[in-house]
Image (cartoon, rainbow, N blue to C red):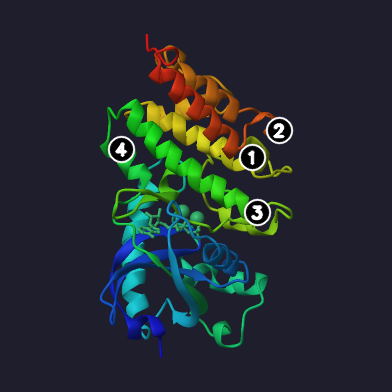
C-alpha cells in the first residue's frame, strides 16, 4: 500500500515541472502541512534528496524525509495520484500559456506519461514492477511547505518594490548560495520560481533537481532541463554545455538581483530586457538609478566565470557599500 496515501491527506498541487510535481499535503499524525515532491525515480532523482539531506540552513528549504514507492499515474487504481494527475493536467494547460519561456512545461511534457512511458522505459533501466504499463517507481520528498509562494509570483505582485527590499532578498539568497558552495555543491537552476518564501517571510532556496558537485560537475543530470523554454537565467557556459563551476550560480543570481530592482510590466518586456542583460546591455537609466548595484551585477554577469566574484566576495562588497552609504559617500541616487 502507498505510504503517501496512508500517512498524508492530499490537499492540492503546488507546481508541476518536467519530471514530476509538488503537492501540498497534510501529515495525518503530526497535523502539519508539507510540500511533497514526487519525481520519477530514474537513478538521478536521489541526487536531489542527497543534497537536501546534507543542507541545513535558514535560507534553504528544509528537508524532512524521503521514500520511494510504486505509483500508478495513469489509471484510477492509485487513487491519490490519479487525482493529482488530473489536477496537473489542468495546471499544464495554464502553464504552457504563460509564454515567458522561462520554465514552463509544454503539452509534450514528461508528465504526459501515457505517451512517454514506453520511450523512457527503453532509455532507463527500470525495475520489474515499474515495467508494467503505467506504473512508475517514484521518489517522494517531504519538505517544508513554503507558504509565502515563489519569488516569481512575489515580483509580479510587488511592483514598485524598494531598493532595500530588493537588497534584503538578494542578501538572503546570497547567504544560501554561499552555504551551498561551501558544501561543495552547485545549484545550477537558480531562478525566481525556484526561490520560495517560508512562513516567516524569509527566503528559501528550493528545487535541487539539477544540483551537482563542484569537483565533478555531471553532464548527465542536465537531462532534467529538457522540455523547458529559453533559459533566461542560465549562465552562457552552462547554456552552451561548456565547462562550468559554481560561478554559474553567480551569473543566475546577478540576473535575479537585476529583476528585483527593475520593474518590467509585461512578460515580453521581461524577456527582451533580460535577454539583453545577458550580454551586459543594461536599460539606459539603470546605472544612474542604481550606481553600486550596476557595478556589482555587471561583474556577476561577466562572460568569463573567473571574472565573476564569488559569494563571499559579494557579501564583503555589499558590506563596504552599506558602510559607505551610511556615511553618505556612495549610493547617491540621481
Ligand atoms: P524538476 O526539478 O524535477 O524539474 P520542478 O522544477 O517542477 O521539478 P520544483 O521547482 O521543486 O520542481 O517545484 C515546482 C513548483 O512547486 C515550484 O516552482 C513552486 O511553485 C512549488 N513548490 C516547490 N517546492 C515548494 C515548497 N517547499 N513549498 C511551496 N511550494 C513549493
Ligand atoms: Mg523548479
Ligand atoms: Mg526543477
CA gap, disc 2 to disc 1?
Answer: 8 Å
Where in the figure is residue 15, as x and y percent of width and height? 37, 58
- Residue placed most toward the observer, 256 or 330: 330
- Residue 108 is tagged as none
- Ranked by sequence position, the earlier of labels 1 and 3 is 3
Q: Are marks 1 and 3 in contact (CB under 8 Å)?
A: no
- Residue 247 is tagged as 1
User: What residue is shown at x 31% (from left), y 74% (from top)?
Assistant: 83
CA gap, disc 4 to disc 2?
Answer: 33 Å
- Residue 156 is tagged as 4
Please name the residue that numbered disc 2 is placed on: 306
- Ranked by sequence position, the earlier of labels 4 and 1 is 4
- Residue placed most toward the observer, 283 or 99: 283
Q: Are marks 2 and 1 in contact (CB under 8 Å)?
A: yes
Please name the residue that numbered disc 3 is placed on: 184
- Ranked by sequence position, the earlier of labels 2 and 1 is 1
Marks 4, 3: nearer the viewer: 3
CA gap, disc 1 to disc 3?
Answer: 12 Å
Secondary structure of the residue carrying tag 2 is helix
CA gap, disc 4 to disc 3?
Answer: 33 Å
Q: Are marks 4 and 3 in contact (CB under 8 Å)?
A: no
- Is residue 146 visible from the viewing direction of this image? yes
User: What residue is shown at x 49% (from left), y 68% (from top)?
Assistant: 39
* Label 3 Cα neighbours within 10 Å, binned few <14 / some 14-19 / many ≥20: few
Marks 2, 3: nearer the viewer: 3
Amino acid at each position: 500500500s502507498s505510504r503517501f496515501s496512508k500517512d498524508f491527506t492530499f490537499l492540492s498541487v503546488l507546481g508541476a515541472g518536467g519530471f514530476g510535481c509538488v503537492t501540498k499535503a497534510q501529515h495525518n499524525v503530526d497535523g502539519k502541512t508539507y510540500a511533497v515532491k514526487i519525481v520519477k525515480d530514474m537513478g538521478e532523482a536521489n541526487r536531489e534528496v542527497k543534497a537536501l539531506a546534507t543542507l541545513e540552513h535558514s535560507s534553504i528549504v528544509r528537508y524532512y524525509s524521503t521514500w520511494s514507492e510504486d505509483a500508478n499515474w495513469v489509471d484510477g487504481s492509485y487513487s491519490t495520484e490519479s487525482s493529482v494527475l488530473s489536477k496537473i493536467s489542468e495546471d499544464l494547460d495554464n502553464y504552457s500559456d504563460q509564454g515567458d519561456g522561462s520554465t514552463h512545461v509544454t503539452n509534450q511534457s514528461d508528465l504526459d506519461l501515457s505517451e512517454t512511458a514506453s520511450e523512457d522505459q527503453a532509455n532507463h533501466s527500470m525495475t520489474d514492477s515499474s515495467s508494467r504499463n503505467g506504473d512508475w517507481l517514484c521518489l517522494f520528498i517531504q519538505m517544508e511547505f513554503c507558504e509565502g509562494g515563489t519569488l516569481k509570483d512575489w515580483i509580479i505582485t510587488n511592483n514598485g518594490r524598494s531598493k532595500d527590499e530588493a537588497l534584503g532578498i538578494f542578501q538572503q539568497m546570497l547567504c544560501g548560495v554561499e552555504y551551498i558552495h561551501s558544501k561543495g555543491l552547485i545549484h545550477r537552476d537558480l531562478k525566481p520560481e525556484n526561490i520560495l518564501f517560508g512562513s516567516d517571510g524569509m527566503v528559501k532556496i528550493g528545487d535541487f533537481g539539477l544540483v551537482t558537485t563542484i569537483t565533478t560537475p555531471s553532464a548527465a543530470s542536465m537531462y532534467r532541463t529538457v522540455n523547458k523554454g529559453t533559459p533566461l537565467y542560465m549562465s552562457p557556459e552552462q547554456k552552451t554545455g561548456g565547462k562550468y563551476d559554481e560561478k554559474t550560480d553567480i551569473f543566475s543570481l546577478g540576473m535575479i538581483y537585476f529583476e528585483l530592482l527593475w520593474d518590467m510590466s509585461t512578460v515580453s518586456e521581461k524577456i527582451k530586457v533580460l535577454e539583453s542583460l545577458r550580454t551586459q546591455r543594461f536599460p539606459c537609466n539603470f546605472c544612474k538609478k542604481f550606481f553600486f548595484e550596476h557595478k556589482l551585477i555587471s561583474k556577476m554577469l561577466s562572460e568569463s566565470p573567473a571574472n565573476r566574484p564569488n559569494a563571499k566576495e559579494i557579501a564583503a562588497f555589499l558590506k563596504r557599500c552599506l558602510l559607505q552609504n551610511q556615511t553618505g559617500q556612495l549610493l547617491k541616487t540621481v
